Image (cartoon, rainbow, N blue to C red):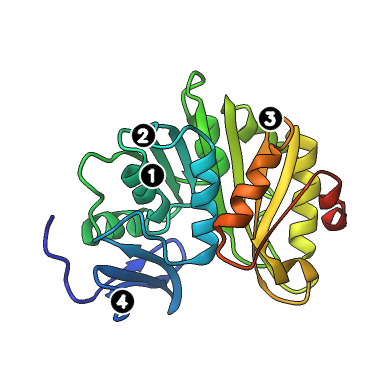
Amino acid sequence: MADTPAAASRFLRTTGQHATIEPDEFTAGGFVLRIGGAEQSHVNLADPSDIFYEYLRRIGHLVDLAAPWGEPVTALHLGAGALTLARYLQATRPGSEQYAVELERELLDFVLDQLPLPEGTRLHALIGDARDALAELSPELRFDVVILDIFSGPEAPEHLACTEFYREAAAKLTPRGVLIVNVGDEPGLTLVRSQVAALRRAMADVSAFAETGMFTGRYPGNIILTGTQVPWPEVWTAALTARGPHPAKVLAGVGLDELSD
């Protein structure tokens, strides 16, 4: 692996912001990606299976359940960031076939240049809008995991935060495939509620996974929604609750009604 500089920056033409990558002083081998000064991603080059952000660790736990442990999967990442989850999949499921869609060409080039992927990673990078890229994929291509990590506040792109897009994503899933959506929201959880309703119209079943306090609707933060093509496996609730990060809570079935519009 090439030497990584102590700090580096790149101008992103699409948004007009600057991206920086700096060493994480608290994690050996860790690096932080910031966009416009806001911390966006964390990568541990020394141990890609170690995920620093709590919401990404929760997504990692969901991916762990999507197929037998260690078995390669096909994965689609809508929103690439620093490719933390792509690195995690290669570390835990070597040989996985992965696709990553990123709107900012400069960002993806910057990340791949400064934070090289683990040896053997099979990643196909696509530049463009998530919905457009989904439509342009080969009709025969199917994924065990589709991860949407684009929503970062109470407002989200309307063409993505809708039932029609989720149906299009669901059509790209294998029979065992799951659709995972990270929803960052403000108190009141208006966006989360709308996305629960939209996913319920597109998938056979839906769950929500987060830090327990998030479900009170009093705090800003992230809730992970998962759409399945079969009834939500109750054993997954127990597994996710046990794995944390703690305190952790999963809502599924009628328990999810409290988050419906």
In this rendering, the count of numbered labels is: 4
**Residue position for label 3:** 229
How far apart are the two marked residues, 1 and 4, measured between alpha carbons? 22 Å
Dot 1 or dot 3: first in sequence order is 1
Query: Horizontally, is 43 left or right of 155 in the view?
Result: left
**Residue position for label 2:** 96
**Residue position for label 4:** 24
Cβ–Cβ under 8 Å for marks 4 and 3:
no
x 30%, y 70%: residue: 31
Label 2 secondary element: loop
How far apart are the two marked residues, 4 and 3, measured between alpha carbons? 39 Å
Cβ–Cβ under 8 Å for marks 2 and 1:
yes
On the rendered image, what quadrant is the N terminus found in? bottom left
> Badge 4 local density, few (<14 within 10 Å), some, or many (20+)?
some
Residue 52 location in percent, x, y? 42, 66
Residue 40 location in percent, x, y? 45, 68
Residue 89, disc: 1
Query: Horizontally, is 219 left or right of 87 in the view?
Result: right
